[in-house]
Image: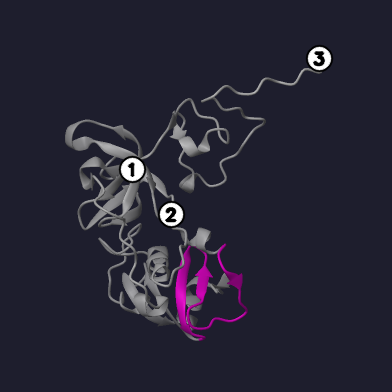
Amino acid sequence: MTTGVPPPEPAHGQYALSGPARVRDARVTPIRGDLADIALAGKLFAPHYVVPMSRAVTGDHAAVRKTPHADAEQTSELLCGERFMVLDITGEGAGQWAWGYCAHDSYNGYVRLEDLGEPDGAAPAPAPGDAVEAALARVGTPYVWGARGGAGIDCSGLVQTAFARAGHALPRDSDQQEACGKAAAAPRRGDLVFFPGHVAIALDPDELVHASQDKGAVVIEPLAALVARKGEPSAIRRLG
């Protein structure tokens, strides 16, 4: 029955959802079945909303894992001093895990609680520099899935950390990075060259630097060699 009376405004501290909402990318949306970041209140439904607690990595690096288990898939990595926004703590004793997201790219996951401590000053900022030179400095670094330069590095981790030196805050995974910048017809120095599930950085139209799972390390390789293994590039992107 329609009464013509408008619905009541939500009370202070309460939130109203006017319709269904979808999680566009679960990797960077801090919500689980039981709770969510307070920033999502009024946008996505959760039984509880939590104010995140900032913590910093105290060692050289800390793995970000898909589930709270030491043998779970590593999906990313935090480096010394980088911030992790804690939304929940699970487990007991030395088996405690923090669930939340990386402050620099909002990537969700679990980090061992013992790897985190109270922040001391500002989070470390990448030293300014050239993205290509930063990538070349990593040549020979072992390829490690999910790593960003601590225990090793993967293809999108190389791109993310190298371009951070040039002031580009890129997302974590290669498919997310493929949505950045503008399309280019042919690669030139500094362009990102994408293949299915992979990304490389152009040194010139014919040569690339990338963290290669096939080669087991960061290598310089002809574009033609990657095309022979992976097929034609799915995209070439240029970051202003």
Point out residue 26 in the picture as x, y percentages from the top left corner: 50, 44
N-term mark: 1 or 3:
3
The residue under label 1 is: 110
Quarter placement of the C terminus: bottom right
Query: Relative to residue 23, is residue 203 depicted above or below?
Result: below
Query: Relative to residue 163, is residue 87 depicted above or below?
Result: above
The residue under label 3 is: 3
Q: How far apart are marks 2 and 3 (CA)?
A: 47 Å
Residue at the (40%, 35%) spot, across then down: 51
Callout 3, which amino acid?
A: Thr
Q: Distance between the residues labelled 1 and 3?
A: 49 Å
Q: Which of marks 1 and 3 is in front?
A: 3
Q: Is mark 2 on a helix, strand or loop?
A: loop
> Which image quarter: residue 169?
bottom left
Q: How many numbered marks have been drawn onto this rendered protein structure?
A: 3
Callout 1, which amino acid?
A: Tyr
N-term mark: 2 or 1:
2
Q: Give the range drawn in magenta.
A: 179-205
In the image shown, does 34 or 4 lie closer to the viewer? Answer: 4
**Is residue 121 rendered to the left or right of residue 227?**
left
**Is residue 97 rendered to the left or right of residue 41?**
left
List the single residue furthest toward the left: 94
